Amino acid sequence: MPVLPGWNSADSASWWGSLFTVLGFVCLGLLVVFEVLAFAYGNRRDSLLGMAAKTAAEEQRSKDEAKDKKMAADLAIATELAEKARMADETSKMRVSELEARLSPRLLSADQAQIIFTFLQNRTPGTVSIKASMNADDAHHYAEQIAAVLRRAGWTVRIDSAMFGGENVRGAWVTVKNKGPAPDAAAARMRAFDAARIQIRGQYDHAVPESDGFWLSIGGK
């Protein structure tokens, strides 16, 4: 192979052989170095990929937590708004019911009338003067309904229009002449009202004539 340097000279061949031997060892050393570097860089790549994956997972978890917190906050706000709307609706219905109750005339139901009649029919009838407020549109009609039940039970009833003064002039109340135990007729009348679940209170006034027995006053609603 005449094209190779020093091919035809023993000294040159010896020199070149030694050179190539050294170069072979150098290349072998470089191969080892390169393998070590390749291994190190491979591990570094895996480490970086792992770190990147961990960072991405943490970022995704943070995003998910933030999303969950926002959803929880939105749900809390929605729940609060729904509760406020429910309370407002209940308040509105309550006010409507109160307004309807104020505007609707008072009526003695058939059940109430029957309870009062049943309670009084076997008791000694009495005399009562029903005072219907002139300031309440439904007072006189309500008094007539009560009077009809009392008369059916044998009572003597008179209905008068009246003007009431003072602070507590709403609802119904029984007025007797003297302070102390109420007359039997007045007590029976109050118990009959109580049985019919009609609220009634008692008071006394010396102006009540003996002939009236007692007064049943119908004030405002």
Image (cartoon, rainbow, N blue to C red):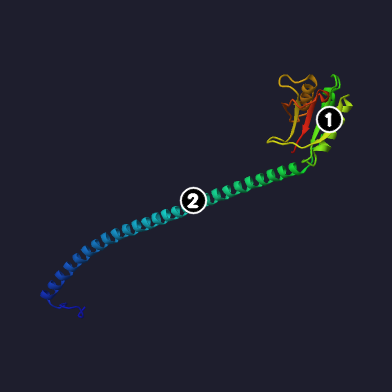
Give the percent coordinates (x, y) of residue 17: 16, 70
Quarter of the picture containing the N terminus is: bottom left
Label 1 neighbourhood size at 10 Å, few (<14), some (14-19), many (20+)? some
Instruction: Give the label on residue 209, or none.
Output: none
* Residue 18 shown left or right of residue 187 in the figure: left
Label 2 neighbourhood size at 10 Å, few (<14), some (14-19), many (20+)? few
Residue ID for mark 1: 113
**In front of the other: 199 or 50:** 199
Q: Residue furthest bottom?
A: 3
Looking at the image, residue 196 lies above or below residue 93: above
* Residue 83 shown left or right of residue 4 in the figure: right
User: Which residue is painted at 85% across and 19% down in the image?
Assistant: 124
Q: Amino acid at mark 2?
A: Lys
Looking at the image, residue 52 lies above or below residue 175: below
* Residue 31 shown left or right of residue 168 in the figure: left
User: Which residue is painted at 46% across and 51% down in the image?
Assistant: 65
**In front of the other: 213 or 41:** 213
Give the percent coordinates (x, y) of residue 94: 68, 43
Q: Amino acid at mark 1?
A: Ala
Give the percent coordinates (x, y) of residue 121: 86, 22
Instruction: Give the label on residue 69, or none.
Output: 2
Quarter of the picture containing the C terminus is: top right
